[in-house]
Image (cartoon, rainbow, N blue to C red):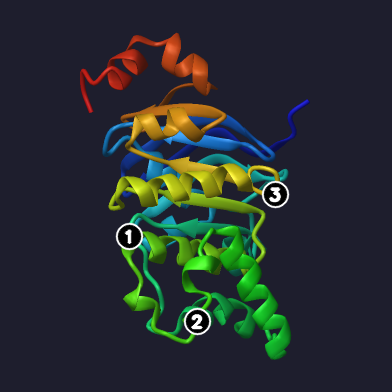
Amino acid sequence: MEKTVIRAKEFSHFFGSAPALKRINLEIFENEIFGIIGPAGSGKSTFLRALNRLNDLIPGSRTEGMLEIRGRDVNAPGISVVELRRRLGMVFAIPVPLPRSIFENVAFGARLAGEKSRGRLTELVADCLKKTALWEEVMDRLDSSALKLSGGQQQRLCLARILALKPEFIMLDEPTSGLDPISTMKIEETLRKFRSEYTIILVTNNTKQAARVADRTAFFLDGELVEVERTDKVFSAPSDKRTNDYISGKFG
């Protein structure tokens, strides 16, 4: 039986008076890859950012309803936003490596948390780079600048940097939108391997990507959740005509 770890109950998100999300109701299960698809402006990235409260940084942002992680509302008083963002690691569309070495990019968070042992940091960096299939490519140049890596390598490095913080959830907002097919394939293979360790939420404009890697898929349109179902069902027999029109390329 699936264990619900994230639950939205009549959840709405506003920027000023305009609703970006309208009374969303959905559940995300532990150790699944949950895909979110929809055209630009549909609210899928807003939902992702609501989970770790990145929307708080936008003036006029406010919410209604409930958005719970393991039974606790993320907007409740007393929630540590810093801890929340550590638990829900975020990978953005454009990789943003730190202007430091490959090693220091991965070790950065652990150092901030007080880890001083070079040996433990070395083990951590190697482990995270291996998990993101980057170790073999960079093991002989860990002291070189991360800015010299290719775009696909930088994206996997950013993912490794998040893993070093020991998150419970990995959230990805269009992580392969600017990558070549080979780099995209490596990211997708990494996500499949992570399924047993993390709950993964993948926002993507690439419907084929959702079909390849997601266990369940939600379709957002104009701030509404149109449907959410097993990915094979969404792509073979969607329950809503709007979903079928979107995945068949009639709009979006």
- Residue at x 47%, y 68% (from the top left corner): 137
Can you see residue 168? yes
Mark 2: few, some, or many residues within 10 Å (few <14, many ≥20)? some
Q: Front-most of 239 and 157?
A: 157
Numbered circle sitting on residue 138: none
Q: Split into 4 quadrants, where in the image is the N terminus?
A: top right
Question: Taking 18 as reference, is 24 above or below it?
Answer: above
SS label for mark 1: loop
First-in-chain label (2 vs 1) = 1
C-alpha distance separating marks 3 and 2:
26 Å
Residue 158 percent across, percent down from the top left: 46, 65
Query: What's under tag 2, amino acid-wise?
Result: Leu
- Residue 210 lies, in percent from the top left, at 44, 32
Q: Quadrant of the C terminus?
A: top left
**Residue at mark 3 to residue at mark 1: CA–CA distance:** 25 Å
Q: Which mark is drawn over residue 142? A: 2
SS at mark 3? loop
The quarter of the picture where residue 83 lies is bottom right
Q: Which mark is residue 94?
A: 1
State the residue position of label 3.
197
Percent across and percent down for residue 180 are 29, 50
